[in-house]
Image (cartoon, helix red, strand yellow):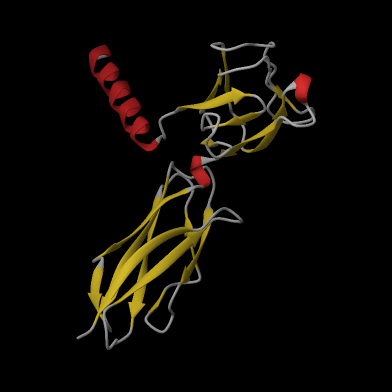
Amino acid sequence: MRRIFSILIVALLLSLGSYAKAAQTVTVHVFSFGFSINAKGGAVVDPIIFIGDTIHWVWDEGTHDSVSDAGQKENWKSTLNGKGKTYDHTFTNEGTFTYFCTPHKSIMKGKIFVLDPAKTIDTITFNPASVKGGKTSTGTVTLKANAAADVVVTLTSSNTAVATVPASVTIKKGTKSITFTATTKTVTADTTVTINGQVGTAAKVPGTLKVTKN
């Protein structure tokens, strides 16, 4: 009986793991005078990560620290470090978090954008991906993790004269995806339509549907 219970627990954990987004570690380079996912000389880019991910600061040159601005849900403070040193912080809250280097506070600042995978669109797909004008295709919006609460996704079509979609769909709490119908119209030439999905004010995520002439 105990063995059966153990097997059930393992199966449950494996099942739950399939719905979760694996945590990642993202490197941020520290140099004079900036923070970036690219090394010095490349474009200065602030990281976009998810709850549960870790920022791994790597000191490439100079003497700097990484200190979060006060009054935020995430707080960290490294020591003043030189080349070759590292510092890690794991983020457990959603939001935009700002930070600075103490000796160069006026010129050396950075941001960490932390998203909630349970409210972030992973993909928008269609089946079939190519359809004759006048036919329908089933679209699927998939999140990066199971929704912790109902998630409303706004849908828009780049060409409503060719393909239309519902104004919005709702992914229910505890689920990861939902389907919707894309209705197409007759076309005189093959046309690719972009269907965008958006949660709140987050960046739009595109999916493509090809509509072919009869």
Give the image location of residue 137, x and y in percent: 29, 71
Q: Quadrant of residue 10?
A: top left
Give the image location of residue 207, x and y in percent: 38, 61
Q: In percent of the image, x 48 and y 45: which residue is there? A: 147
* Viewer-side residue, 136 vs 187: 187
Give the image location of residue 150, x and y in percent: 53, 51
Q: In percent of the image, x 26 and y 65: which residue is there? A: 129
Is 153 rendered above or below residue 50? below
Is 112 rendered above or below residue 174? above
Q: Residue furthest front?
A: 41
In the picture provided, is 102 more to the left or to the right than 84?
right
In the picture provided, is 192 more to the left or to the right than 86?
left
Q: Quadrant of residue 93?
A: top right
Figure label count: 0
In the picture provided, is 87 more to the left or to the right than 131?
right
* Viewer-side residue, 204 vs 87: 87
Give the image location of residue 134, x and y in percent: 28, 84
Q: In percent of the image, x 40 and y 68: which residue is there? A: 194
